[in-house]
Each structure stands twice: as C-alpha cells, then as structure tokens.
Image (spheres, rainbow, N blue to C red):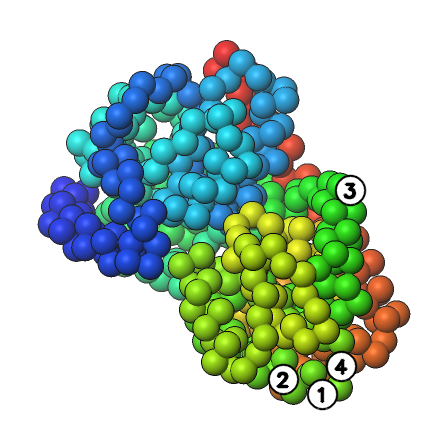
Amino acid sequence: MQNLYSFLFYSAIPLIISRLWWRSLKNPAYRQRIFERFGFYTQTYVQNVIWFHAVSVGESEALFPLIRLIQTRQPQFSILITTTTPTGSARVQAVLGESVQHVYLPYDLPDVISRFLKVFKPKIAVIVETEIWANLFYACEKIQIPLYLINARLSERSVRGYQKIPSLVVPSLCAITKIATQTEADKNRFIEIGANPEKVENLGNIKFDITIPECCLSEGQNLKNQIFAKRFVFLAASTHDGEEILLLDAYKNLKKQVPELILAIAPRHPERFSTVGNLAKNADLKIVTRTSQKTCNDTTDVFLIDTLGELKLFYATADIAFVGGSFAPIGGHNVLEPAAVGTPVLFGLEMKNFALIAEKMLTANAAIQCKNVAELENQIIKLYNQPELRKNLQHNAKNFVVQNQGATERIYQLLNLESFI
C-alpha cells in the first residue's frame, strides 16, 4: 500500500506545483522557497536538532509556549520548526526569529524525506495535531528517530476516512513513539483507527497555555485610545470568504442602534486583505487600514487589520469579538485567545475544529454562540446595553482558560528531552 501511495504522490507532483502557482497569484510567498518542499537547501543548517512540525499559524501559536519552555530549560538544544504555509512560516520567524531554524515541511516522498533527514539529522520528531505522513513516519522508524504526535485531535469524519485505508494508516501509527491527545475522545478515536492503546495518552490541549503579557493588554488599551477614540469596537477576527459581507451588513443594521460602533476586521488570509477592503468600499462604508497608520474619526465605519501577528493586540482593543470561520463551513478558529485577553467572545455554529472547547465555554457562560447573523446582531446590542454582562463573560472566559492549563508542562515531561543530551 505504501508503494502505491508513493506512486500516486509522485504522479501528483505536476498538480501540486500547479496548485502552488495558482495560490501564488494571490500570495506570492507560495512560489518562494519551493526547493525546500523537495528537500533541497541553499545553506548549511545545524544538525542533531529537536524537530517540531506545525502546519500553519494556529498550530504554530499553540507550539510557542512549549518552544519557549524548552529554550529556557534546555538552551543547549538546536530547534527546527517546519510549517506548510507561508503564513505559518512568517509567524514562526516573527515570534522566534533566529533562535530556531525554520524551513517548509518537505513533501512526503521517499527521496525527499531522505534528503531532509540527512540535512538536519533530528534527534526527535514532534508533529503537532493531526499530520499522518506514511513515508515520513516509516523513515523515522527505520533510522530510529523517536516520533511524537502531540496535541493530537481526530474528528469522527477523519476516523471514517482513515478506516478505509488501514494498510497505510496502521503501520504509520505503529511507527509513533507516543501520541498525546487533546481529549479523552481523541484518545479513543486514535485507538479506534489502529493506534496501540499503550502509546496513547490524553494530556490536554496546549492551546489553553496561552500567555497574554500585561504589556499587550496595556498596549491594546493605549492603541484603542489612539486610533478608536471613544468608539465601541466590534472585532471580527479570522474571517473567511462569505463572512465579511454578512458582517458588513450587520454593521449597517447595528449602527442605527449603536451610533459609536466601529467594525474592525482581521481576515484569516493575507491574500484577501484587498478583497475585504473592496467589499467595505462597495458597501459605501468608510474604511481605514492598519498599514495606513491613520486614526479613525467619527465617520469611520471599518478598520481593516491588514497585518499579521497583531490579533492579540487588537483583541485587547475590542469591546466584543466574533471569531470567524464559524459562519462559513470552516470549522471555527481559536476562541481561547480572546478569552485569555478578556474580550467577550461570540461565534457561530460551525465549530467542529473546536467543538469540545466551544461546548465547555458555553457551559461555563464564557462565550455566546449565534446561530445566524440576526442573532449576532441581537447579542451585540444586548452586550452593548449591559456592561455587567460583558464583565461576567470576561471573568468567566479568563477563569475557563486558567482552569484548563497545564498541557505544555505535561508534554514537556513526556518528551523527556534530557535523554537526548
């Protein structure tokens, strides 16, 4: 089965390159550093690394506390982080800079993986969340590189998919040293698709271990005073195609009842910044962009956050936050970040990627779920008119995050990095 998988992967390379080119039309970064994806490098790298793979921005953000913990306790280790997307790459470089090495994850082809492993010679491989790559896992097992899957999650839909190809999935799972899952349900699902029960452990979700420095909160308040003056800030974060037009219409309706309202929008993908800006202009709304460095006045309707890496800062400026990917069929995004900041959190029904977190937040009265835009409008008006309700949401959300922290330390202990000194 693995040979067939490799053959199909090799056959798909022209399509893969075409897809990179197509995506580069909107984001030129996709056509850069392509050789890295095939295991070819233009410089010399440090070897014998501790290697982590995080797909994109969300996984990278979750990983940062663990990386900082390792750098504090084991500064002698050289750390490599791979990502798949340019946005993930940019975030790693912005946050960790030269304190780590970074390249794109190579494609899961035998010769490509072989080149990658020879260049970096990792002492240990750590994959964040759910990335099962048959050739990579086989190669790690063959040359005895301990392989860990951390903060692992698995949906029921993924279980059904993996169960259709057991001859490929089960050997891959056997190559893993340990699987640390986010929840007990995830643990049971990995066992269901063929993981050894003795190798699977529920250690919790490292996304709870988010840290919000006091300087970020104070800087956010200062920024609010500088650019938003006395406006009531409704932040729509990590939005996707189809959501912004709904939110712009909602803003027009809300403005009639909340005159000082301003809508701040942070699109999920940077290639859509200009598209969202045009949507606002076409809706006859006055827009100011973050990159313009201009302040908003009483007539400004929309503030477009056309930068990366500033979402925590803008959560700290917001009076209310809606987390996107939850009105579109995306599955939601990280609602713990605004909760940790202390911003009242709203989201839609499409939360499959954060289903358990969303459920627990609702139970703890730490967030509000809206089934549609009309309900979102009603909740915003309610929160605007009831400051005490906003305070209760903020208090409950912060407590919810704190009460579920600790997974980073547990995973650090699981990796047992002292044994690789």
Q: Specify whether residue 218 is in view.
A: yes
The x and y percentages for residue 421 are 50, 12
**Residue type highlighted by circle 1:** Lys
Q: CA distance from mark 2 to mark 4?
A: 10 Å
Q: State how far apart marks 2 and 3 are (Cα).
A: 34 Å
Label 2 vs label 3, nearer the camera: 2
Q: Secondary structure at mark 4?
A: loop
Q: Dots 2 and 1: beta carbons under 8 Å?
A: yes
For label 2, the residue is: 252
Circle 3 residue: 214
Mark 2 or mark 3, earlier in chain: 3
Task: Determine the residue positioned at 65% across, 87% down.
Answer: 253
Residue drawn at x 25%, y 52% as measured from the top left: 20
Identify the element where label 3 is drawn.
helix
Q: Can the viewer see residue 143? A: no
Residue located beneath label 4 in the image: 258
Residue depicted at x 27% and y 47%: 31
Q: CA distance from mark 2 to mark 1?
A: 7 Å
Q: Give how far apart the Cα atoms at labels 1 and 4 are.
A: 6 Å
Q: Earlier in the sequence, mark 4 or mark 3?
A: 3
Sequence-wise, the earlier of marks 2 and 4 is 2
